[in-house]
Image (cartoon, rainbow, N blue to C red):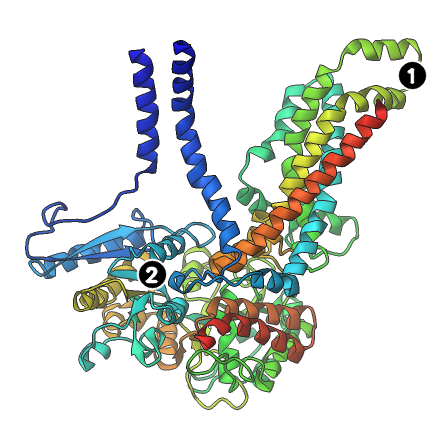
């Protein structure tokens, strides 16, 4: 009988252990380094701890705790994203419901508007001009929603129009100055010129695809902006006559022209550019490192991003990455802002570059890294980011806008559907998602 | 009496952990899904949730993308169920017949089942790629390169065929078990009567396997309806949404666009549909059995 009772008890206790969540309420002394008199700040990051990126975050927090010893104590928690990008965002969503958000959390650049519009994050405490001026304009722009600064990133990103120097030289083409990029029309002429050269190499002038996911809007939004178009109104709530403007329809048809004239392959071919069978490729800044490490035969250059025929010189090139923001749960916005500034600061950027090769977010960091002065390709990417960087559209319905842009692009450029009709349809779907913000 | 009661306590104590876990992770979420489906629950602002009646359901049935993903899913089911069911039966019969290397064939056909779907999908992206193995073979046969997963027309069948390849081994093992359970005396008797191979198959093998067939077809059908990983990895639902499935739509709506309410309503519609289909399948198969009697 006693035995049975023990059995029953143990079965029950297993159940209770499974059921009990861990409610945290940390007091000074409970964690190594958290002392009496310090203000406790917790921070969530979207990465795995045992990766170079995770180590850089851990390192930054440890330096913060040293620098602010006696005043603040930051406690970092790693919540990895899973394959499909969930995990971290699921946890954030669940915590919005339960009210358990940390003081500081990482937010992907394009999600800042949605998080701000839904009151998940709050504006940072005011930064001095000196502090603001440390950051690239694109970082400040990305973090600003409705004229308030919500988030700062330690990383920036960029997309380059890469070219194969040998092929370009063979075709006798001159790469223009960064302030005088090829226009849509000029680029078509260049591609026409390259077509014969590339046909003989069993390749294409352009290695280009319209992939599902974030890449399409990230790579090709500059075509929209530099052609005088846009995606959404200033406040991020109106897409009508903006997303589906005539100018955008024209830009979308431009992509169709690239496919129709076979300047690019309609189906993605792997490593076209890397194997020397394409003259140009649009890809993230990481491509430079990939080429250097894995394809030393490719003689790589970075050309300025293409612009519309009537480009007014405005900012247009791709940017954006993960940022730090203060949650609306924090009662210590001063402390949270200090932590955000620290995590996105020069030192953090340098460390992240060293460990992951991601582009830093502050001018000083670029100045301290030799590569950006010496290597012409890294230098070109930095200057493009510094001079022409444009954050992705800022709207609370960003996920819908991004996928609608990709779908329209695919339908128009690859399936040959009518541009205006597709953009109208896409606009309707984005409008559906914006409804909740407009009525409330 | 006392013993019986203590047995009951004992039983309950073993059952309770499972029950609690099932309540927490299965029954409560199911109930919540039904409740959420009548609200405008938005993951980023849960405090603003209101009951909206059947608004979500109206939206779903007006939604072109949902309709499209519904028909895509039906398309997957229509290709996968017959191919995988008959393929498994055919393989089982063949493997059962071979005299040598029986174990090798069993393992070889079963390996894809054990592999992760994401891995299999990535592998097949290479196989289907414009310069991949299939197109190279086609090239040698003088056939033009096919776009496969990069074309709106071919993507769905391409993914469906890959799924059949991946899943067929599992049902083959089930059929193989069934085949080996058939009394050899039946075949011996048939041989005495000079029955042909086809007659033996039609009049002995098939009727003996019938209960298994029903089980196999229902599991394949439900499996095919749940299609999400393959299109997610291989095409992202494209090109032009041609491989966007119901479960994919539910996932995207709920996690990417944060609309838990709408996504719950989709899930409810999906479940109702699968239940109806299962009932139809049950009724159909029951009828046949009764007719036999």
Image quadrant where residue B110 sits:
top right
Please name the residue that numbered disc 1 is placed on: B195
* Residue B161 position (above or below residue A36): above
Foreground of the two, B134 or A277: B134
Q: In the rendered image, which quarter contains the N terminus of chain B?
A: top left
**Residue A162 in sight:** no
> In the rendering, at what x and y percent does residue B36 appear?
49, 55
Q: In the rendered image, which quarter contains the C terminus of chain B?
A: top right
> In the rendering, at what x and y percent does residue B210 appear?
76, 26
Q: What element does badge 2 sit on?
A: loop
Marks 1 and 2: in contact by CB < 8 Å?
A: no
Q: What element does badge 1 sit on?
A: loop
Foreground of the two, A41 or A202: A41
Q: Is residue B184 left or right of residue B57?
A: right
Number of numbered discs? 2
Please name the residue that numbered disc 2 is placed on: A357
Foreground of the two, B27 or B108: B27
Foreground of the two, A38 or B112: A38
């Amino acid at each position: 009988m006693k035995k049975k009772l023990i059995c029953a008890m143990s079965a029950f206790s297993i159940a209770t252990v499974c059921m009990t969540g861990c409610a945290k309420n940390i007091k000074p002394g409970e964690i190594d380094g958290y002392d009496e008199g310090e203000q406790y700040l917790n921070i969530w990051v979207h990465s795995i701890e045992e990766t170079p990126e995770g180590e850089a975050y851990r390192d930054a927090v440890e330096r913060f705790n040293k620098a602010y010893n006696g005043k603040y104590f930051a406690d970092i928690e790693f919540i990895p994203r899973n394959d499909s990008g969930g995990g971290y965002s699921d946890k954030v969503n669940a915590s919005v419901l339960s009210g358990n958000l940390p003081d500081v959390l990482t937010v992907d650049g394009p999600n800042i508007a949605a998080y701000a519009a839904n009151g998940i994050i709050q504006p940072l405490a005011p930064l001095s001009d000196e502090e603001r001026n440390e950051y690239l304009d694109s970082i400040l722009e990305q973090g600003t929603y409705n004229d308030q600064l919500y988030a700062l990133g330690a990383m920036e990103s960029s997309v380059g129009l890469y070219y194969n120097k040998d092929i370009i030289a063979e075709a006798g083409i001159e790469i223009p100055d960064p302030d005088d990029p090829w226009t849509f029309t000029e680029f078509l002429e260049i591609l026409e010129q390259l077509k014969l050269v590339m046909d003989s190499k069993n390749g294409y002038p352009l290695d280009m695809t319209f992939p599902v996911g974030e890449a399409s809007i990230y790579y090709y939004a500059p075509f929209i902006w530099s052609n005088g178009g846009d995606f959404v109104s200033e406040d991020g709530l109106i897409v009508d006559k903006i997303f589906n403007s005539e100018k955008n329809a024209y830009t979308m048809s431009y992509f169709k022209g690239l496919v129709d004239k076979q300047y690019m392959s309609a189906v993605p071919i792997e490593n076209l550019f890397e194997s020397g069978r394409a003259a140009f490729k649009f890809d993230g800044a990481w491509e430079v490192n990939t080429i250097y490490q894995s394809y030393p035969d490719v003689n790589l250059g970075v050309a300025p991003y293409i612009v519309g025929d009537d480009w007014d010189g405005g900012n247009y090139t791709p940017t954006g990455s993960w940022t730090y923001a203060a949650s609306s749960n924090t009662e210590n916005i001063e402390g949270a802002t200090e932590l955000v500034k620290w995590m996105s600061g020069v030192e953090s950027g340098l460390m992240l570059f060293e460990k992951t090769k991601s582009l830093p977010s502050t001018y000083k960091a670029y100045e301290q890294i030799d590569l950006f002065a010496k290597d012409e390709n890294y230098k070109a990417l930095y200057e493009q980011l510094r001079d022409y960087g444009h954050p992705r559209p800022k709207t609370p319905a960003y996920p819908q806008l991004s996928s609608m842009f990709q779908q329209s692009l695919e339908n128009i450029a690859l399936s040959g559907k009518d541009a205006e009709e597709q953009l109208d349809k896409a606009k309707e779907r984005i409008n559906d998602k914006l409804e909740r913000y407009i009525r409330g | 009496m006392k013993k019986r009661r203590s047995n009951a306590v004992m039983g309950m104590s073993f059952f309770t952990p499972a029950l609690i876990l099932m309540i927490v992770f299965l029954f409560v979420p199911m109930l919540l899904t039904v409740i959420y489906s009548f609200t405008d629950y938005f993951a980023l602002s849960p405090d603003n949730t209101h009951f909206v009646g059947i608004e979500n359901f109206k939206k779903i049935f007006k939604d072109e993308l949902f309709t499209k993903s519904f028909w895509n899913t039906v398309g997957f089911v229509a290709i996968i169920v017959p191919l995988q069911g008959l393929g498994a039966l055919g393989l089982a019969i063949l493997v059962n017949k071979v005299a040598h290397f029986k174990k090798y064939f069993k393992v070889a056909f079963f390996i894809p089942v054990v592999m992760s779907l994401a891995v299999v999908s990535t592998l097949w992206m290479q196989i289907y790629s414009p310069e991949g193995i299939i197109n190279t073979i086609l090239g040698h046969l003088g056939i033009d390169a096919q776009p496969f997963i990069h074309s709106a027309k071919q993507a769905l069948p391409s993914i469906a065929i890959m799924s059949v390849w991946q899943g067929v081994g599992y049902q083959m093992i089930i059929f193989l078990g069934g085949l080996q359970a058939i009394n050899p005396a039946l075949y011996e008797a048939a041989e005495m009567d000079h029955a042909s191979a086809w007659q033996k198959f039609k009049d002995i093998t098939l009727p003996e396997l019938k209960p298994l067939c029903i089980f196999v077809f229902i599991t394949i059908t439900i499996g095919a309806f749940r299609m999400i990983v393959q299109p997610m990895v291989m095409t992202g639902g494209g090109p032009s949404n041609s491989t966007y499935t119901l479960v994919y739509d539910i996932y995207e709506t709920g996690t990417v666009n944060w609309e838990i309410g709408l996504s719950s309503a989709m899930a409810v519609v999906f479940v109702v549909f699968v239940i109806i289909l299962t009932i139809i399948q049950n009724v159909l198969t029951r009828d046949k059995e009764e007719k036999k009697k």
